[in-house]
Image (cartoon, grey):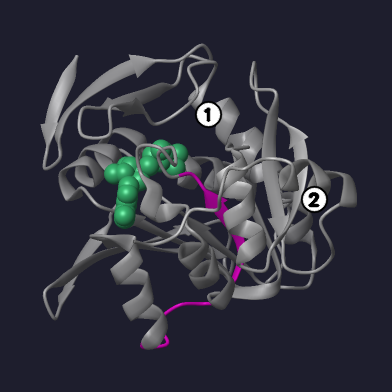
Amino acid sequence: MEFKGKLGIYKIIETEDKTKTLWSEYFNEACHNLSGAYEETLYNYINGCDIVSQIHSNENLHVLDVGFGLGIGLKALVDTLQNNKLQSKIYTYTSIELDEDLFLWSIAHTFPGHIFTSFHKNGNTSYQSEFSFGLNEKLRVTIFIGDGRMTLKEAHKNNLLPEFTAIFQDAFSPKKNPTLWTKEWFLECKAMSSNHVRLATYSSSISVRKSLIAAGWCILNEKGFGLKRTMTKAKLIGETAESLQVELSRSPTLELRDI
Ligand SMILES: C[S@@+](CC[C@H](N)C(=O)[O-])C[C@H]1O[C@@H](n2cnc3c(N)ncnc32)[C@H](O)[C@@H]1O
């Protein structure tokens, strides 16, 4: 089973937890680990960014999901909010997606019947939606269509973004999609975030870790999902463990930079 989007063919693949992922012809890569798309998302991003602790803290929760894909990051966040007693505070989810056809396919399959409204301004398209969990508890959702390096920068410049408290760094791999893993990208992420932000990614590549550190993040090495040995978490407050810094300094691999 497959469908055609703006960026070529997407093949629908069932993963081991019975949830679906997509293989993208354009990036020649699947959106998730085949051990389980939903379980991986819970592990890497909901747990990786301490979402449950953030729900129970006094701070607002503002998630940036780097790559909407099938919308599994949003689905896992909605389920987590549903399963926890919420405080009366602000909850937002922001994401980016290059391929509008993929986005439309994904909302129809992951959120059947749920309404997303499109907005067009200065040649840019975004979609907004809302999920309600009680009388006053809502998750406000915005997805910017187009290259996130541009759309987020512009939205940030126009004060349209909250200060992110969680970043799901879930782009295709640095080899296939390098512009979302560079020092400059992580500098932008830092500029868009609160001091208490948590960033998590499935990647444990040396170049990605060096890009994060070069942009002022401190990083943690953590056990990866399924068969993956390690993943990376990052914060703006604290320090990278000396042992990890020494390990990275032994590798000649460089950080990734915008060309
Ligand atoms: C690995 S998938 C994300 C999976 C998603 N988080 C989920 O749980 O379903 C990466 C997504 O990022 C999108 N993407 C890649 N580069 C992008 C860019 N520069 N700007 C916006 N979206 C991008 C791809 O089209 C793809 O849908």
Q: Nearer the viewer, residue 135 or 66?
A: 66
Residue 83 seen in this snapshot:
no
Residue 166 seen in this snapshot:
yes
Residue designated by label 2: 245
Q: Residue at x 64, y 44 (%)?
A: 46
Residue 225 position within the rendered picture, expressed as x and y whole percent measured from the top left: 65, 26
The answer to which image quadrant residue 166 occupies is: bottom right
Residue designated by label 1: 38
The reply, left or right, for residue 5 in relation to residue 69 is left
The reply, left or right, for residue 104 in relation to residue 208 is left
Q: Which residues are magenta?
A: 158-170
The disc placed on residue 136 is none
The amino acid pointed to by label 1 is Tyr
Residue 189 position within the rendered picture, expressed as x and y whole percent measured from the top left: 53, 67
Residue 89 is covered by the magenta coloring: no
In the figure, 102 relative to 245: above or below? Answer: above
The quarter of the rendered structure image containing the N terminus is top left
Which numbered disc, 2 or 1, marks the residue that appears first in the sequence? 1
In the figure, 177 relative to 215: above or below? Answer: above
Q: Residue at x 46, y 63 (%)?
A: 185
Q: Residue at x 36, y 36 (%)?
A: 110
The quarter of the rendered structure image containing the C terminus is bottom left
Quote the CA–CA distance across marks 2 and 1: 32 Å
Assign a secondary structure to mark 2.
helix
Q: Are marks 2 and 1 in contact (CB under 8 Å)?
A: no
